[in-house]
Image: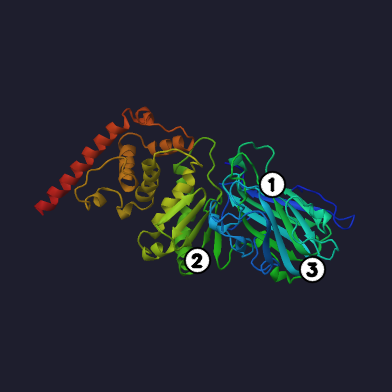
């Protein structure tokens, strides 16, 4: 795993500002795909604000076409962030296959700008930010408020403030540039200048295909004269809020964020019931699923909100159905998120081609046979409640969990961790079962099925006699 919150603190562009002794600074924060979370937490970049000068500003397209799959211009200054790395509706981006475009921000009046901060998130080439920022007070006699492509803004009343490019020159793989980015443009003199208008000249991150237009999540403009409460919080202060809270695992190696903004009714349960379990069990799950040179994510997030289904995990982000959880308080709610925490630790990466039955079976094995065996959620007690049941080792979830437990008890106690390590390294194949147990997986499946059916028959005979 890459180091968390890879920070590129050096200025990417140093430009002379209005005063000769001042200089513009461009700071960049980057969270890799496996470290990013919906709270956009960077060590050197302010958190997103919902009460900055851009909140009430007018955003407009100078040139370029908006992609209708996105959320539109409103997403750039609503103070809200995407729930996951590929959330088109929560971002603004230009039309697929086009060369970007230009955005104008009208602040309504000339203000002393302290910072301009931009945020983006995507798992691959649409994550980085590449743009030029211009500013103007609008008073020049030749001022053009909407210079289209082909017109140099500096020739019509605009000043070039910064040239931003967060792509890494050392990475040739487009996906390796993916992740979450925060850019903060400021000036060593304390303010960028006195301006009313901002112009973002945005270009694609790549042109090898049509998917190079960045997913921009937010643009903030901080007024240097605004009350401190209206300016961005310092990043280190963001440990708990009405919308989320952060805690560390028992070994201190992982930080977990739980977001309850869209499910405030579950805040108390999440703090009292869910958080202590995850703090204790995440390190145990990590220990159960090791592989050489692997370090489990040092941060992951859980977002609770109304949605379809029960829950899903994407990298180090878990999203769970708050309505379903509320109905399962005291029953399956906590266990279901232990299952998702297993997926965080499994960490197979984008594009992994592993058997789904084994991926889900592993998560249910740890949940039902390690975390809550007393629930009998996947053992013979649970199977007895099934009717006309023909067990198959690759039926996934609970059934595969039972199969894995059987193999680990009868043949190899380390089988679950060994198979998971192979999947994590992209080296899984069915031949590994024979390598570790001396039998093919179909043969193991048949032997396990006979054992299960025998136990079920024995249980039925006992019930009939009683």
* 271 w.r.t. 180: above or below: below
Front one among 111 and 138 = 138
Residue position for label 2? 262
Q: Which mark is residue 166?
A: 1
Q: Residue at x 76, y 63 (%)?
A: 197
Residue position for label 3? 110
Q: Nearer the viewer, mark 2 or mark 3?
A: 3
Q: Residue at x 39, y 51 (%)?
A: 371
Q: Report helix, strand or loop for mark 1.
A: loop
Q: Residues within 10 Å of mark 1 (few under 14, many from 20)?
A: many
Whether residue 44 appears in this view of the structure is no
Tell me which numbered mark, 2 or 1, is placed earlier along the sequence. 1
Front one among 466 and 293 = 293
Residue 393 image offset from top left, x and y in percent: 30, 40
Tell me which numbered mark, 3 or 1, is placed earlier along the sequence. 3
Q: Residues within 10 Å of mark 2 (few under 14, many from 20)?
A: few
* Chosen colour scheme: rainbow
Quote the CA–CA distance across marks 2 and 1. Answer: 32 Å
Q: Residue at x 49, y 43 (%)?
A: 347
Quote the CA–CA distance across marks 2 and 3. Answer: 36 Å
């Amino acid at each position: 795993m890459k180091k968390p919150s890879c920070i590129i603190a050096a200025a990417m562009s140093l430009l002379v500002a209005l005063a000769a002794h001042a200089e513009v600074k461009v700071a960049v924060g980057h969270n890799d795909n496996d470290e990013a979370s919906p709270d956009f937490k960077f060590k050197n970049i302010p958190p997103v604000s919902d009460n900055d000068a851009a909140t009430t500003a007018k955003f407009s397209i100078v040139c370029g076409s908006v992609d209708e799959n996105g959320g539109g211009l409103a997403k750039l200054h609503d103070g809200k962030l995407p729930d996951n790395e590929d959330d088109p509706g929560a971002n603004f981006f230009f039309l697929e296959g086009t060369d970007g475009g230009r955005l104008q921000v009208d602040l309504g009046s000339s203000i002393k700008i302290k910072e301009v901060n931009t945020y983006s998130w995507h798992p691959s080439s649409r994550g980085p930010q590449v743009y030029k920022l211009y500013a103007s007070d609008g008073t020049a006699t030749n001022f053009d408020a909407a210079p289209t492509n082909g017109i140099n803004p500096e020739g019509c009343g605009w000043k070039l403030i910064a040239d931003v490019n967060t792509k890494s020159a050392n990475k040739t793989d487009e996906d390796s540039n993916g992740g979450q980015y925060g850019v903060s443009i400021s000036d060593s003199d304390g303010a960028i200048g006195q301006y009313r208008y901002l112009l973002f000249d945005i270009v694609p991150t790549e042109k090898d295909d049509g998917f190079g237009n960045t997913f921009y999540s937010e643009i903030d403009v901080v007024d240097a004269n605004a009350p401190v409460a209206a300016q961005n919080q310092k990043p280190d202060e963001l440990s708990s809020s009405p919308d989320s809270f952060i805690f560390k695992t028992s070994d201190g190696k992982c930080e977990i964020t739980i977001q309850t903004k869209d499910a405030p009714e579950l805040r108390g349960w999440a703090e009292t019931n869910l958080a202590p379990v995850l703090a204790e069990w995440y390190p145990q799950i990590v220990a159960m699923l090791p592989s050489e040179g692997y370090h489990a994510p040092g941060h992951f997030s859980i977002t609770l909100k109304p949605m379809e289904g029960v829950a899903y995990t994407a990298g180090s982000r878990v999203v769970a159905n708050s309505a379903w959880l509320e109905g399962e308080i005291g029953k399956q709610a906590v266990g279901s998120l232990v299952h998702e925490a297993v997926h965080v630790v499994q960490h197979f990466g984008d594009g992994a081609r592993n058997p789904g039955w084994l991926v889900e079976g592993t998560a249910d094995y740890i949940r039902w046979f390690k975390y809550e065996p007393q629930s009998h959620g996947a053992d013979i007690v649970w199977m007895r409640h099934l009717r006309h049941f023909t067990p198959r080792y690759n039926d996934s979830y609970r059934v595969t969990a039972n199969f894995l437990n059987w193999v680990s008890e009868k043949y190899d106690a380390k089988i679950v961790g060994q198979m998971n390590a192979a999947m994590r390294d992209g080296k899984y194949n069915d031949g590994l079962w024979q390598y570790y147990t001396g039998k093919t997986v179909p043969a193991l499946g048949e032997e396990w099925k006979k054992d299960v059916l025998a136990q079920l028959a024995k249980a039925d005979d006992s019930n009939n006699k009683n």
